[in-house]
Image: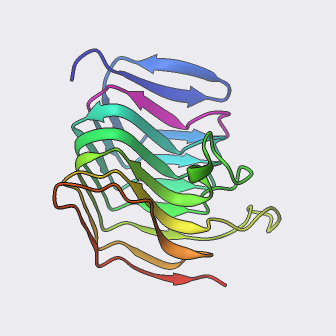
Amino acid sequence: MSGGELFLGCHTNLQRLAKLVVEEGGTVTVGGDGFAAYGSTCGFTACRSEQNGRYGLGVYNADSWNVTGCSFDRNGFAAIAFDTVRTSTVTGKLLGRAGGGGGKGPEADHVAVQALLRNCSGVAFTCNTGLVGADDDGKGQTTPDFALLVKNLDCCVIKDNVFWRGYLKDLLLDQGGHVGGTVLRDNLGSCAR
């Protein structure tokens, strides 16, 4: 997809990146998304995003993403959010303590979850892990409530993820609407309570 934009949060400012390959990037304590992408194609490897006000990585209306080997910790909403993303892979990530920014995102379904996948087609989300926790000083709300939130998936595979002590309420919040033979199975997890 041409004409996309990838934004890297730098404290409270957003800077447009011309190159859509991000390796070993990092954001800490940004008011919005740590990394935000709109209509872009990107390789996103070995990046770290933590303590951002919204998502660690928010990808919107995009395709052809490859997210590999990244770490997301204590972001305000989901560690990673794919909304209207097509033909992409997400694998080998550590998702930690997501939802520490007060519990609710822009919509009620964004409540304390490690990963949000909504309105996606042809996305493979495999071999990821996550944990619950509070702030580094042990204070603040312990999060997240759920490991995965999924809605309106078409021909996606979400499997082989492991969330040992990775949520407080349930492994999966499935809001339905899936079509096209979506595979949603073989994800393991245990409650941290």
Where is 64 relative to 96, above or below?
A: above
**In front of the other: 4 or 154:** 154
Along the line of sight, the residue nearer the viewer: 27 or 55: 55
Q: In which quarter of the image is the N terminus?
A: top left
Q: Position of residue 127 (x, y in %)?
A: 31, 68
Q: Give the range drawn in magenta.
A: 29-41
Horizontal side of residue 40 vs 193, given as left or right: left
Pinpoint residue 95: horizontal percent, then vertical percent: 49, 61
Q: In which quarter of the image is residue 99?
A: bottom right
Q: Position of residue 132 (x, y in %)?
A: 61, 71
Q: Which residue is drawn at 77% across and 64% down?
A: 141
Q: Is residue 122 left or right of residue 72?
A: left
> Looking at the rendering, which quadrant does residue 2 occupy?
top left
Which color scheme is applied?
A: rainbow
Residue 54 location, quadrant:
top right
Q: In this view, does 50 lie above or below 144?
A: above
Q: Is the magenta stretch mostly helix, strand or loop?
A: loop
At horizontal 52% and vertical 52% (from top left) the residue drawn is: 79
State the image coordinates of residue 125 (x, y, percent, origin top left): 30, 59
Q: Which residue is drawn at 40% across and 37% down?
A: 59
